[in-house]
Image (cartoon, rainbow, N blue to C red):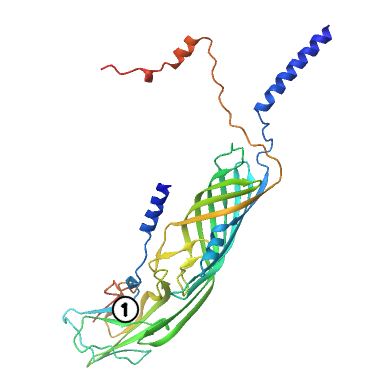
Amino acid sequence: MKYGFLVLLCCVACTQIPDCSLDPNADVFFVSFSDDEVNSFTFTSITNDLITTDYAPDSAILAIALPLTETSAVITYRFETDTLEYSLTVGYRSQLNIYGDDCPASVQFLDVEVINYANFDTAFVTNPILTSRIEENIEVLF
Amino acid sequence: MKFFFSTIFLLCAATSLWGQAPDSIPEDPYPWRPSFVRLGYDMAPAGQTIFSPNYFGQGLSAEIDFNTLFLVTEAGYMDRKYPASNYSSNGYFFRVGVDANMIKYDQSKNVITFGVRYAGATFQQQLMTEASDDFGQREIAVTQTGVQARWFEAGLGLKVRIWKELFAGYDFTLRFGANIDDEGEILPFFVPGYGQAYTQGSDPRGLVLGFKYSLYWTLRIRDKPVPIRKVKPPKVYDSPLEEQNQNISPSNFGTRN
């Protein structure tokens, strides 16, 4: 009987109770920019085709986090500089999942792919899943 | 006179045969012919249904014997709600497999079994949540029907006679090798008959522990004798000296230091 209680205690102790704040799902993808000569890049405007929000920071950047939405499976971001307009079209899949019994549902973005790009030398996916632990999803070369 | 001795001889022979009868039960000439159908009702989900407002479950089983093997089918329905995420999953499941009885000599016809199952579920999921970000505030409501899952089970079971043909039993199973349809808009969190499918969001659970407590009623098709374990008769020695010599073995000798 006492051994049964010990086994039960171990089972309860070993049961993982997830902390909802550790849910790794993220709704932004990280784009990093690189070039042989320039160390950082300045954009006058960064917008997408779904909303009018401008995501261009005031300072020069090497990477930026840009949001995705589950209301669409494709999004196109336009990057404007003083001289040229670049674009990057990204496709993805969204899925609702639950981190734990007592956690709210969250959206996971996965299967990220570069569908199209303009004026960049190249753009490719380095990690197709968006999580808060990943610092780069797409790398863009000028 | 001659007739008298013949009669005595026949009587003695018959008596010797009758004398052996209580020690042995005639072997079943058709061991693979089914002798019963056992119907079961899983009390575990029924109990959970009573005590949890977010759970409803029912499970039935039927099994038929073929010698010491039981062909088992199980089916049930489960509906599970998670209020924190406004998620619900409900649907039907089945299990088909074989149990092997490991105590075929038990005269009460209690059984301890090792069994394997192939199982599946068809269910629907619903999820409602709210999102608020740069793209606006909105309500997300998704219903996904016809979601499929398949898996395997292996486990140990015990059934004990408690009254006439009424049996009670436990089953502990390990569920593994799950193949769950995860391409839909909702990643299945709860699969009826299987349990929680993913942990920490999207990590598949490799092994899921299952438990059943069931009541069974056995319908006898025919009377099948329970075999008696054949015990090796003790060897008879002609003299005590011979018996003593037989008991001496090298392991009985002590080590001399």
What element does badge 1 sit on?
strand
Question: Horizontally, is A120 left or right of A11 in the view?
Answer: left
**Residue A112 or A14: which is nearer the viewer?**
A14
Reading the image, the residue beneath label 1 is: A29
In the figure, B236 relative to A74: above or below?
Answer: above
Looking at the rendering, which quadrant does residue B16 occupy? top right
Q: Can you give x and y, in whole percent of width and height, for residue B242 in the image? A: 48, 11
Q: 10 Å neighbourhood of mark 1: few (<14), some, or many (≥20)? A: many
The residue positioned 19% from the left and 86% from the top of the image is A60
Q: Can you give x and y, in whole percent of width and height, for residue B182 in the image? A: 46, 68
Q: Residue furthest front?
A: A2
In the figure, A68 relative to B124: above or below?
Answer: below
Looking at the rendering, which quadrant does residue A113 occupy? bottom left
Residue type, mark 1 in image: Phe
**Residue B235 or A34: which is nearer the viewer?**
B235
The residue positioned 75% from the left and 19% from the top of the image is B14
Question: Horizontally, is A7 left or right of A134 in the view?
Answer: right
**Residue A61 or B12: which is nearer the viewer?**
B12
Q: Quadrant of the C terminus of chain A?
A: bottom left
Q: Can you give x and y, in whole percent of width and height, for residue B252 in the image? A: 38, 19
Chain ID at mark 1: A
Number of callouts:
1
Q: Can you give x and y, in whole percent of width and height, for residue A26 in the image? A: 33, 76
Question: Horizontally, is B257 left or right of B164 in the view?
Answer: left
The residue positioned 25% from the left and 88% from the top of the image is A56
**Residue B201 or A100: which is nearer the viewer?**
A100
In the figure, B100 relative to A48: above or below?
Answer: above
Q: Residue furthest top?
A: B1
